[in-house]
Amino acid sequence: MGEQVFLVTGASRGIGAATARMASARGYRVVLAARAASSTARLAAELGGPDRAWSASCDVTRYEQVAGLVQRVEEEWGRLDVVFANAGASVVTSFTAEDGAPPAEWGDMVLTNVCGPAFTARAAMPALTRHGGHLVLTGSAAGRGVRPGSLYAATKWAVTGLAQAIRAECVGTGVRVTLVQPGLTDTGGIPASRAADPKLAPEDVARAVLYAVEQPPTVDVNEILVRPVGQDAHR
């Protein structure tokens, strides 16, 4: 059947890029999906080029693009074993003040963070079922508690519920579903107000993803919450 295939959305930087590197080092062929394929071209070359890694243009807010990518992966590499629904967006919001991004800019974040993983799951599930695969979703520690004024946190609450709904529907299919909930992670987009806070490196989160993926096929790691030492649980 060939080597296992690991698809990462949001692979151009941060957690996605770190996980792709780690998966490649473990022997997976990797598919690096981002809105612009050019943003992952250098990483694909670093990881071995067309036989080991390739870049793909995929906007996860467009279901037809995600479904087309999954079809292409199966056609070219014959299988799909792990899908990491990692693509996400973040803007600072307030419901009572003029702080942060204006409401006109909120929609893309909601579509990316909520519809993105939902569309990815729906598009990938037939392939994952055929190959006894694994779906991993990037949530957030922010999806476990109240963050005043944060629509981002609300989208990650949605991902928490989404993971649970997918897992419940996958009972009996052999597909494993894992929700990874990182605390503050240094992905290059941290608000200035939190610049001095303790942070995870993207590689810390990637290790958590690979921990879940590398368990025996009879073990389903449902959720992983990982924070940097010293992070306030309410932030």
Image (tube, grey):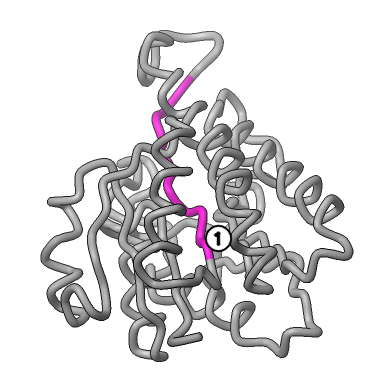
Point out residue 152 in the picture as x, y percentages from the top left corner: 53, 33
- Residue at the spot of label 1: 182
* Amino acid type, label 1: Pro
At 79% across and 50% down in the image, what residue appears? 164
Q: Is residue 101 magenta?
A: no
Q: In the picture, residue 102 is in which quadrant?
A: top left
Point out residue 163 in the picture as x, y percentages from the top left corner: 72, 50
Tell me if 177 is positioned left or right of 206 in this view.
Answer: right
Q: Main secondary structure of the magenta part?
A: loop
At 35% across and 66% down in the image, what residue appears? 76
Q: Secondary structure at mark 1?
A: strand
Tell me if 66 is positioned left or right of 14 in this view.
Answer: right
At 23% across and 79% down in the image, what residue appears? 51
Q: In the picture shown, does residue 136 fall above or below 153?
A: below
Point out residue 149 in the picture as x, y percentages from the top left corner: 57, 23
Point out residue 25 in the picture as x, y percentages from the top left corner: 34, 89
At 32% across and 60% down in the image, what residue appears? 14
Q: Residues within 10 Å of mark 1 (few under 14, many from 20)?
A: many
Q: What's drawn in magenta, residue-wise?
A: 83-93
Q: In the picture shown, does residue 163 fall above or below 154?
A: below
Toward the viewer: 80 or 149? 80
